[in-house]
Amino acid sequence: MVGKIIQIAVITLLSGSLAQAVTSKENYNYYCAQCHGLEGKGDGPNATESQPVSPKDHTDAKEMSELTKDDVIKVIRGGGAATGKSTMMPPFGKTITDAEIQDLVNYLRKLCNCKFENEP
Amino acid sequence: METFRFSRFAGTWVAAAVALSGLLLGGVEAGAAEGKQTFDAKKCRDCHQTEGPAKAKTIQDQLATKGPELWYAGSKFKKEFLGKWLKDPKPIRPMEFNSITKKNPGDHPKLSGKDADEVTEYLMSLKSKDVEEGVVKPDKNPKNRNIFEKKQGCYGCHPVKRGEKILGGLTGPTLIGAGERLNPAWVYAYLKKPKVFKPVKRMPVYVDVLSDSEMKGVAAYIGTFE
């Protein structure tokens, strides 16, 4: 009986977390691509000529590898202001979880096909 | 005797006044009730949620919706704007709803005069208890402008006007004319309680990023947009 209850509880927990799992691609396409573009080239629909700064090209291996992983996390969480960049890069720390931000960092590594500064 | 006659006379007037106000109130309610019928008949409900609370809790849920929720329309919109827009629905969002690749086709269903007025009555009756009326007054103060333009880049995703020039991003609803369109008290509540009005959207959550007074300030600034 107790075993059955635990079994049901585990299944409920699992299916709950499965339903909620968001992939980094989903997050990137929903939140980031509107400025950085669906392929990360810095050409989303918000990158209009009238903007004071252009969104970073996330496929530019040279520029991306000049950033440290810590700075990338900071800038996603706190926006441009967190690392002395433009506030046109908005803060997402209250919108997505820290774990999702970690996943986005991995996704960015794939987009630039590079490693961040000081990474082995 | 004198007083008796007077009170009978007054009584008649009171009765008449009560009857008249009853008629007027009944009239308003009838407008909203007919508006609700029109809303159903025209299948507006296929694309619009008119009962709270917010349903879309994940990106997938949100992407599956076909139109913005209207269950707090009476707290969000200014009545005069709504009446005009339903008759001549010019695009509010530059992009097609939920899309970042296609332009808004500008094909929203139109309503004719009487239908539009009644649907306006109906939509204006959909209020949210989370909007406290009158807490924000339009205010162009440079401090408020600074929150919108420098402290945060709100125009990064929203079209705005600077002088005669149109600038800004395209994925958020236009804020040009927001002073005539939106209730500033709702804008403040929308920033302050994102989970109540729109848990999942492309716009970041600014709770604990902007202070309460900054939220009021930026809402007051948007309230001045022509």
Image: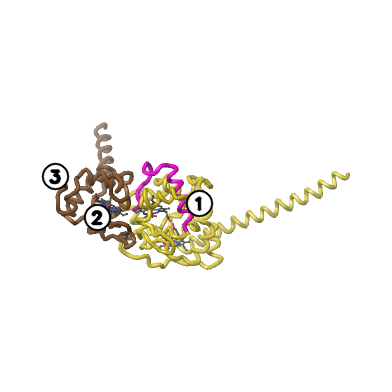
Chain colours: A brown, B yellow
Q: Are marks 1 and 3 on the same chain?
A: no
Give the labeled residue for mark 3. A119
Assign a secondary structure to mark 3. Answer: loop
Assign a secondary structure to mark 1. Answer: loop
Q: Are marks 3 and 2 on the same chain?
A: yes
Residue range in magenta is B200-225
Q: Is residue B221 left or right of residue B11?
A: left
Residue situated in front as seen by the camera: A64 or B111: A64
How far is mark 3 from mark 2, CA to CA? 20 Å
Q: Residue B89 in the image: x percent, y percent?
A: 46, 65
Give the labeled residue for mark 2. A56
Determine whether B85 is above or below B20 in the image. below
Q: Residue furthest right?
A: B1
Quadrant where the C terminus of chain A sits is top left
Magenta includes B211? yes
The residue located at (45%, 55%) in the rendering is: B70
